[in-house]
Image (cartoon, helix red, strand yellow):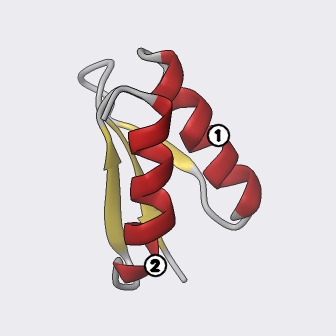
């Protein structure tokens, strides 16, 4: 998504549709400001979730929806 508005909108309308143990992929976390800001806001609202990084590449990041 890159931009704040698109990423925020995706979290708002799509994150609840992800099944338990499903993955929310964030391609530009810590790379693009808008995606990073929206992701941090989502994680602040959902304190039981955390961001994960793939070990072999700087992007993407992902959230495992464990609820």
Residue 64: give x, y in percent of width and height. 43, 63
Q: How many marks?
A: 2
Q: Residue at x 55, y 42 (%)?
A: 39
Q: Residue at x 30, y 25 (%)?
A: 59
Residue 38: give x, y in percent of width and height. 57, 39
Q: Looking at the image, which residue sits at the far left?
A: 56
Q: Is residue 12 above or below residue 25?
A: below
Identify which residue, 12 or 30, lies in the foreground: 12
Q: CA distance from mark 1 to mark 2?
A: 17 Å
Residue 19: give x, y in percent of width and height. 34, 84
Which numbered marker is on residue 40?
A: 1
Q: Is residue 14 above or below residue 16?
A: above
Residue 55: give x, y in percent of width and height. 32, 29
Horizontal side of residue 20 vs 59, given as left or right: right
Horizontal side of residue 60 vs 48, given as left or right: left
Identify which residue, 10 or 44, lies in the foreground: 10
Quadrant where the C terminus sits is bottom right
Q: Is residue 41 above or below residue 60?
A: below
Label 2 crowd (10 A; few <14 / some 14-19 / many >=20): few
Which residue is labeled 2 in the image? 16
């Amino acid at each position: 998504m890159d931009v704040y508005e698109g990423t925020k909108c995706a979290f708002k309308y799509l994150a609840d549709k992800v099944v338990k143990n499903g993955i929310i992929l964030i391609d530009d976390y810590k790379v693009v400001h808008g995606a990073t800001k929206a992701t941090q806001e989502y994680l602040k609202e959902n304190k039981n979730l955390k961001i994960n990084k793939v070990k072999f590449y700087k992007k993407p990041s992902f959230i495992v929806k464990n609820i």
